[in-house]
Image (tube, coloured by chain):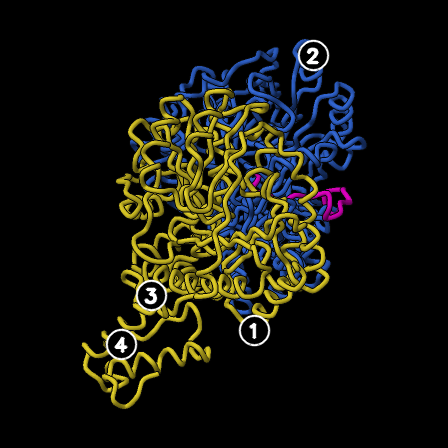
Chain colours: A yellow, B blue
Amino acid sequence: MATAGDPLYQQLADRLAAMIRARALRAGDRLPSVRSFSRQQRVSVPTALQAYATLEARGEIEARPRSGFFVRARAADTVPTPTTPRTRPRKTDGAELDPFVAVLCDQADPALVPLGAAVPGEDLLPVLALQRSLSTIARRSPATIARYHAAPGEYAYRQAIARRSLEWGCNLTPDDVIATIGATEALSLAIEVVSNPGDTIVVESPMYFGLVRMLRDLRRNVLPVPVDPTTGVDLDLLEGALRRTRVAACVLTPNFHNPTGSLMPDAHRRAVVELLDTAGVPLIEDDVYGDLQHAGPRPRCLKADDRTGNVILCGSFSKTLAPGLRAGYIVPGRFYEQVLAVKRARTLGGTMPMLAVADFLRNGGYERHLRTMRRKLAGRVMRMREAVAEAFPEGTAVSRPAGGFVLWCALPPGTDALRLFHRAKEAGISVAPGGMFGTGFENCVRLNCGYAFTPRIAAAIRTLGRLAR
Amino acid sequence: MATAGDPLYQQLADRLAAMIRARALRAGDRLPSVRSFSRQQRVSVPTALQAYATLEARGEIEARPRSGFFVRARAADTVPTPTTPRTRPRKTDGAELDPFVAVLCDQADPALVPLGAAVPGEDLLPVLALQRSLSTIARRSPATIARYHAAPGEYAYRQAIARRSLEWGCNLTPDDVIATIGATEALSLAIEVVSNPGDTIVVESPMYFGLVRMLRDLRRNVLPVPVDPTTGVDLDLLEGALRRTRVAACVLTPNFHNPTGSLMPDAHRRAVVELLDTAGVPLIEDDVYGDLQHAGPRPRCLKADDRTGNVILCGSFSKTLAPGLRAGYIVPGRFYEQVLAVKRARTLGGTMPMLAVADFLRNGGYERHLRTMRRKLAGRVMRMREAVAEAFPEGTAVSRPAGGFVLWCALPPGTDALRLFHRAKEAGISVAPGGMFGTGFENCVRLNCGYAFTPRIAAAIRTLGRLAR
């Protein structure tokens, strides 16, 4: 403990440490900036900085590039991250997931504590700004509501996406982009253009339930390749699968994969693009979480390493702006003409939502909004992780996602997550049991961290921990 | 000519006839109601009624059930309606229409007098009321913009459509209906569920260009069966076509077919439903114009005569409310489960537009709006018909649609409508040349009557007439 004789920076560091112990500052909280802290505490900037450095050296806080200092999640630090079994991929028609359709419906029950469905809290979305933007368009030209566009869609919208593509390491023109009704339409267009019913599509394991259900509805088989929460999709197993099985396409989520949160290591990216290109297998990239890194620069897209047009990039503003706008896009590469023809034959898009998104992007509102959203999500995920580390049984492993808003928890072997799901539901809590994401994950649960970490959610995590024991 | 000695009703009738000759009252104008006229002219109601009856007997005006008295289009009365050649249907992949894709783009050029694309004038659409409805939803619950629904779509929307189905002679429940992104998605879902690439689909001839392009994009062949502007689709030729060719589905527009405006005679309706049912060929019904009759009751849907679920009804609010809302629907009958699965795999729908439409329908705004829109469209079509009759060369035939907002004009044999299209474009006028609608219509043009009949449009019709000579 510091005494009056200790240097000033150490006294400050000790007082902050006491606040952390007393939970006046909680895991994931951001500390004031060094400049603010020096002003608030009436100390010099170097003293304030030294106080923070001391706490960082003690492991109480951590610096994140361009974001500042945060209270570390210390309980969570001792928790391992889950690993995905490296089992050899086996083709399936996805029928083993059918019993989970009912579970999927339960997840959206608004009466339950919302840890099931992977959705951002509505407080994170700029709904008022978007409504204002829509109102402005309506006032300026009421008849805009009557307008619609055939593929490729509103020019201003495609232009805004092309400009943003620099952030992903691409340099697209508006002519590379086709507007879609959300990323769902983008994914289904990509799949239906490059494959036929009965074909086999490589997906990730654990796999996003919605994608597998889509593939089942479109009568495609799936070949799930393991994705590790830390090291991403297993390249050896992927290569072997491509060698052994005739595959029509491969769907990958390099940035903040759902449910593991994995970020594909940079070293793997060019390799995976080249592997699929050489194999002549179209690579469908699902980038809906790409804008939601918790710190640092926005990760690149696989599309950025695409030299032959073999990568079909699918994205949307559903996770970052508002799902109800249905503002998605597809960058079909060498499949452009085919995607355009099928899209044109299937749906036309309303003009208003596209113009509202374009307006938001053009006027800088999107970047400002993302900065806030990323910071809040980082805090929510970190707090949830800390709470899980404290409450879940010894032997639980929890993912450490660098973006997005879900946690992937592997409970001790033998835990029946489906039973946990049912008992949690009785206790008024919604979770996503691991079996929804493929075989081999029966002891896992996915937790949504999109909502503010309220006492209600904290209590729910403690209840889940009790039920899991 | 009336003199002071004539009865009062005859003096009144003569004065009205003079107004008509002087174009103070023009073809298609509605006269004041009998009650208003009697009050305005300070005569008794029986006298006013007798004046109108006199004019009606002279053929100057006509009564329309539940709508009142209208000035007759006398020049137009002498013009015949076009007939469609009863040529034996021949299968095609639609490639002969490809050169018209460029024409299609020209049609939407806002610098031209808009007689080309078939769109209602924006003044006819309740854009302000819809914007108000959207604002109310946004104010009450801003986060509605973040919400979306998977198939079958918002319950309130499906409920509103089910309630309206009584108007079409159906009695649907919300569970019969799936919300779609406009009628385009409904049609493409229907086609893709009941057929495969390479299959043959029966369409109408002349045929709606958008449908043929959709079928071409989806790699279906088309088998066009003649539709007469007056007698509708030719049942004998349809029956023969079904007997000779293996057909996967048949797309029909019984109500105000585009471009002929034909309304399928009641006597044919049950026959056509039974014919296709017996042949085991799914009947896809396109009803986007069904709400736009010019007078009298709303025509029934073929779906109303469907006893086996073989009819797939496709509709939308794009022609009557606002195309930009993309509010469509499909009633898939016995194909419900398949349509649901494919729709679910392809697109999710935003909540706000669906709630705005449901609100408009529930609160009676839609019926009030339709009454006004129908009356205005009837007037616009009638005036355009009169202007065409006066300006186009001797030997021109013009359709007499009972609903919708297009006129189908057959110019004298030998007229090159594509040349007329190009010369009209140079003169700042957009029209749709007959070749867009199939082979055998090279002397035809379709005229959009969706806009108010302004002096600019009147002048454009005179110019077209001059160019056509």
Which residue is tagged 3?
A62
Q: Nearer the viewer, mark 1 or mark 4?
A: 4
**Label 1 to label 3, Cα distance in Å?**
25 Å
Q: Is residue A240 magenta?
A: no
At label 1, the amino acid type is Pro
Q: Chain of mark 1?
A: A
Q: Residue at x 26, y 71 (%)?
A: A53
Please report whichever mark, 1 or 3, sits nearer to the chain's N-terminal start: 3
A165 vs B384, left or right, is left
In the foreground, A306 or A457: A457
Please report whichever mark, 1 or 4, sits nearer to the chain's N-terminal start: 4
In the foreground, B100 or B457: B100
At label 3, the amino acid type is Glu
Q: Residue at x 56, y 73 (%)?
A: A455
Which stretch did the figure color magenta? B166-183
Which residue is tagged 1?
A455
Asked if marks 1 and 4 fall on the same chain, the answer is yes
At label 4, the amino acid type is Ala
Which residue is tagged 2?
B240
Which residue is tagged 4?
A51
Q: Residue at x 70, y 47 (%)?
A: A102
Q: Are marks 1 and 2 in contact (CB under 8 Å)?
A: no
A310 vs A96, left or right, is left
Q: Nearer the viewer, mark 1 or mark 3?
A: 3
x, y (%) of residue A348? 48, 40
- Classify mark 4: residues with Cα within 10 Å, few (<14), some (14-19) or many (20+): many
- Give the farthest residue toward the top: B244
- Classify mark 1: residues with Cα within 10 Å, few (<14), some (14-19) or many (20+): few
